[in-house]
């Protein structure tokens, strides 16, 4: 598919369904339905659905790759995404769905233990629209962001706890630039977590893949290191880490899968030379590095930080 077709695919899906790719309506909150998290509180957990959408982003990229090999099917792909035939073309991996919901549930448990009066938005936990902003579709982003903000204000939200770098960035730094009177306080869950009791048992050596937004924009660097160290993990710094971190390849996956994979493999080799356990802090980074590993002979484990902290 051409770049223009991909952009239209993302824009049309987001404005019509609320998600950038075809996904079930309850994908954002179904993980929480049996967890008894209060619906009303002083502070609200806001996932922005990015972790939950990763399986569907993965499947959509693969679907677009197939369509891209056939001329003139960009429009057909967009139409297919809005029909009952979506499930034929877009088949998310079950293990990735289970991983994403497990990680979100773990983050929620951590947040509940560390934030007094935390509640969850359930049906109002809507996708932030960050991808619209990142691809330059600013008019569509403003329209979608206005809907999200209106729903949050109707709920009486004054403070949000976010769970990934992209959602934190867009809700903290970008929404105020587009929405007049934006007045929601946004804090990332890693910023509110207390240290675990010091462990005398060394649990092993890990290396952290710092997401670009945490490292260069949000300055969330010490928090994950402090939390892992408090559990007894030894942090081994990769050659390119902290503010000098290296891209996972994820941002260009839909537009240039081959380039994305090459970047991810380069990064994965570097991380694997540092430690056999690689810790990610972002669902897009996890997906990119995991896909790269499929075609590489590396004896490594990739874990989201919540899987170690929970």
Image (tube, rainbow, N blue to C red):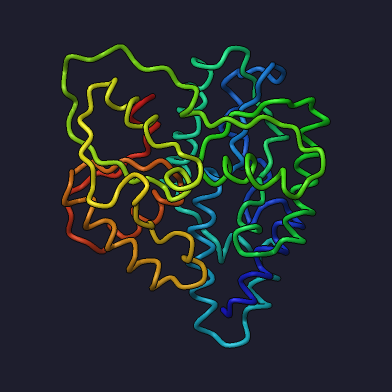
**Front-most of 32 and 138?**
138
Using residue 308 as the reference point, say whether residue 81 is left or right of it.
right
- Name the residue rendered at 77%, 40% in the picture: 149
Q: Nearer the viewer, residue 216 or 310?
A: 216
At which x and y percent is residue 220? 44, 36
**Total marks in image:** 0
Using residue 215 as the reference point, say whether residue 130 is left or right of it.
Answer: right
The answer to whether 11 is drawn above or below residue 256 in the figure is above
Compared to residue 262, the image places residue 189 above or below, namely above
Q: Position of residue 19 (x, y in %)?
A: 66, 52
Position of 39 relative to 302 (above/below): above
Residue name at image x 46 percent, y 65 percent: 253
Residue 88 quadrant: bottom right
- Who is closer to the viewer here, 60 or 255? 255
For the N terminus, the image quarter is bottom right
Instruction: Please state if 206 lies on the left or on the right of 178 as rendered.
Output: left
Q: Residue at x 31, y 40 (%)?
A: 279
- Residue 185: x percent and y percent? 67, 29
Displayed quadrant of residue 237: top left
Nearer to the camera, 194 or 253: 194
Quadrant containing the C terminus in the rendered view: top left
Task: Give the x, y percent position of residue 161.
Answer: 59, 29
Q: Is residue 85 above or below residue 228?
A: below
Q: Residue furthest bottom?
A: 71
Q: Residue at x 59, y 42 (%)?
A: 49
């Amino acid at each position: 598919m051409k770049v223009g077709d991909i952009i239209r695919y993302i824009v049309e899906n987001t404005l019509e369904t609320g998600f950038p790719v075809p996904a079930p309506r309850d994908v954002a909150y179904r993980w929480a339905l049996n967890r008894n998290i209060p619906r009303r509180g002083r502070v609200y957990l806001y996932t922005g659905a990015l972790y939950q959408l990763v399986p569907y982003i993965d499947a959509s990229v693969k679907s677009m790759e197939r369509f891209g090999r056939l001329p003139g099917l960009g429009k057909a792909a967009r139409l297919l995404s809005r029909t009952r035939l979506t499930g034929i073309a877009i088949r998310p991996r079950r293990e990735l769905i289970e991983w994403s919901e497990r990680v979100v549930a773990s983050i929620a448990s951590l947040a509940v233990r560390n934030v007094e009066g935390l509640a969850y938005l359930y049906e109002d936990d809507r996708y932030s629209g960050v991808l619209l902003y990142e691809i330059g579709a600013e008019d569509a982003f403003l329209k979608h962001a206005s809907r999200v903000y209106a729903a949050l204000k109707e709920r009486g939200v004054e403070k949000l706890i976010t769970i990934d770098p992209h959602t934190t960035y867009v809700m903290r730094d970008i929404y105020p630039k587009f929405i007049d009177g934006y007045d929601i306080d946004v804090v990332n869950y890693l910023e509110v977590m207390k240290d675990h009791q010091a462990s005398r048992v060394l649990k092993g050596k890990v290396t952290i893949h710092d997401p670009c937004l945490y490292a260069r924009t949000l300055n969330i660097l010490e928090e994950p290191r402090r939390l892992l160290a408090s559990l007894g993990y030894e942090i081994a710094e990769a050659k390119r880490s902290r503010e000098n971190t290296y891209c996972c390849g994820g941002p260009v996956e839909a537009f240039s899968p081959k380039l994305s994979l090459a970047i991810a493999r380069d990064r994965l080799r570097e991380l694997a030379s540092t430690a056999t356990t690689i810790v990610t802090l972002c669902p897009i980074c996890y997906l990119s590095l995991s896909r790269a590993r499929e075609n590489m002979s590396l004896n490594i484990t990739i874990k989201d930080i919540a899987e170690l902290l929970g």
